[in-house]
Image (tube, rainbow, N blue to C red):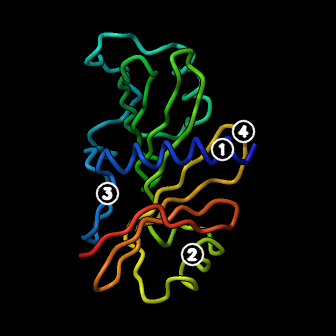
Amino acid sequence: MKKVYSGIVAMLTIAIFLAGTVRAQGDNMRSDLALNKESISQVSTLSSPYDQPVNPKAIKNFNKFYSDAVGAQWTTIKNQGFVCRFLKGDMVNRAYYNRAGNWVVTVSDIAEKQMPDEVRQSVRSSYFDYSIVFVQEISFPQGNEPVYKIQIQSDKEFKVLKLNDGEIEEVSKGNL
């Protein structure tokens, strides 16, 4: 079962990394998604570029689990399912659903101070010469512990880490 989750996390991590959500600089770790509480006040179903309506089961599931979400925006992922982007508190989130409307995963952009203490301490103790610059919390419907994707940076290089079940794995690295 752990291998299945690791495979899913690896695929999701690669997809997120290739989509350019990891940033190497800046204090503002906000997603490029322009959501704010004042401008968007209710859940809306948006037309997608593929003109496929959002599965009502996905909307029902979303409303059940994210009743306090602000500014939900739905998009169809061609032949895959749907993604709903929304704010919950100060966090930008993306909830992914398959075509049948079942929740698959939620990715939340969080600040270092929002990380669980044990996760932050694990990274800080292993990479004490690095600063944490970007964090994503990846949650699954099975109720397992979230997986964390963390970008760290020193004066000379950056690294992308995956923290799963207390184990840290270096996913990628590069020079600045």
Gap between marks 4 and 3 measured at Cα: 27 Å
Q: Where does the C terminus fall, quadrant-wise?
A: bottom left
In 3D space, how far apart are the residues under numbered discs 1 and 3 (Cα atoms)? 27 Å
Q: Amino acid at mark 4?
A: Gln
Above or below, 53 against 147 in this view is above
- Residue at the spot 59% in from the left edge and 68% down from the top edge: 168
Q: What residue is shown with label 4?
A: 142
Q: Amino acid at mark 3?
A: Arg
Please give the name of the residue rendered at 65% of the width and 67% of the height, measured from the top-left corner. 167
Work out which quarter of the rendered image holds the N terminus and state it.
top right
Q: What residue is pinned by disc 2?
A: 120
* For marks 2 and 4 on the same chain, the one whose residue lies earlier in the sequence: 2
Q: Which residue does the numbered mark 1 point to in the structure image? A: 5
Q: CA distance from mark 3 to mark 2?
A: 19 Å
Q: Which residue is mark 3?
A: 30
Q: Are marks 3 and 2 in contact (CB under 8 Å)?
A: no
Q: Position of residue 71 (x, y in %)?
A: 37, 36
- Secondary structure of the residue carrying tag 2 is helix
For the residue labelled by badge 4, is the local secondary structure a helix, a strand or a loop? loop
Q: Amino acid at mark 2?
A: Arg
111 and 99: which is toward the camera: 99
Q: Earlier in the sequence, mark 3 or mark 2?
A: 3
How would you rate the neighbour count of disc 3 (Cα within 10 Å): few for under 14, some for 14-19, many for 20 or more? some
Mark 1 nearby-residue class (10 Å; few <14, some 14–19, many ≥20): some
Residue at the spot 44% in from the left edge and 40% down from the top edge: 94
- CB under 8 Å between callouts 2 and 4? no
Residue 47 — which label?
none
Between the residue at mark 2 and the residue at mark 4, the CA separation in whole angstroms equals: 24 Å
**Left or right: residue 22 compared with residue 125:** left
- Which structural element holds mark 3? loop
